[in-house]
Amino acid sequence: MSILRKSLTTAVCIALCVVLPMAFHAIPNGGVLFSPMHLPVLLCGILTSWPFGLLCGIAGPLLSSLFTGMPGAPMLPQMMVELGCYGFMAGLMMAVVKTKKVTANVLISLLIAMLFGRIAAGCARAFIFARGSYSLPMWISSYFISCFPAIVMQLVLIPIIAAALNKAGFTGRKMG
């Protein structure tokens, strides 16, 4: 994939970080249940590479906050850490994981990125943003239980989208 195509893909994914939360926040508790910014950031890392995924994960929530007020100022730094880690690790793992199946590469990369991002965000909350008032049960609840529908949605949709774009020749390379 050319630098231009990676840049354009990243720009579209950043735009989706602004638009998708507006749609999902129309659903009661939709932001927590579906984590709408996570989908384009993870997809960006999978389709492009780690630098573009990292950029998307940092710029997406920042621009969304500036344009829409979501996420709010108290949550913004935490989300930038989490989503930056998602985009970075998804792109890095796609470069490292080499099975014979595109879907397996994407799923393995996603699982590692999602776990890495959740651990990094939990550590950032525990040691920087909510020092002394953050616990392991709070981390498990906020990063695994309350957002379980989002986890399932990401693990189902991202491999389908990535495989379809790869099959259509969008990536310009074999992701598998």
Image: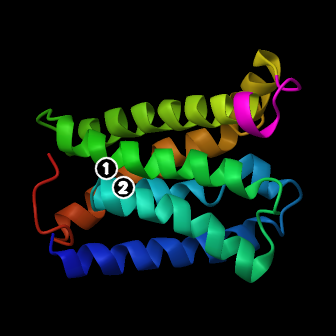
Which of the numbered marks, if any, corresponds to residue 106?
A: none
* Sequence-wise first label, 1 or 2: 2
Binning the other alpha carbons within 10 Å of mark 2 as few (below 14), some (14 to 19) or many (20 upward) gives many
Observer-nearest of 69 and 35:
69
**Mark 1 falls on what kind of element?**
helix
* Whole-percent x, y for residue 111 in the image: 43, 33
* Whole-percent x, y for residue 101 in the image: 17, 39
Q: Main secondary structure of the magenta part?
A: loop
Q: Residue at x 66, y 35 (%)?
A: 124
Residue 132 sits inside the magenta stretch: yes
Residue 139 vs 4, above or below: the answer is: above
Q: Is residue 78 visible?
A: yes
Observer-nearest of 42 and 23:
42
**Mark 2 falls on what kind of element?**
helix
Task: Assign the N terminus to one quadrant of the image.
Answer: bottom left
Binning the other alpha carbons within 10 Å of mark 1 as few (below 14), some (14 to 19) or many (20 upward) gives many
Label 1 amino acid? Answer: Gly
Q: Residue at x 22, y 82 (%)?
A: 4
Q: Is residue 161 visible?
A: no
* Quarter assignment of residue 48: bottom left
Q: Estimate the spatial distance between the alpha carbons at disc 1 and disc 2, rounded to whole Å.
A: 4 Å
* Whole-percent x, y for residue 171 in the image: 19, 67
Q: Residue at x 69, y 53 (%)?
A: 77
The residue indicated by pointer 2 is 45
Magenta-highlighted residues: 127-134
The residue indicated by pointer 1 is 91
Residue 163 sits inside the magenta stretch: no
Q: Residue at x 21, y 72 (%)?
A: 170
Task: Please state if 154 lies on the left or on the right of 50 as rendered.
Answer: right
Task: Please state if 71 lies on the left or on the right of 16 as rendered.
Answer: right
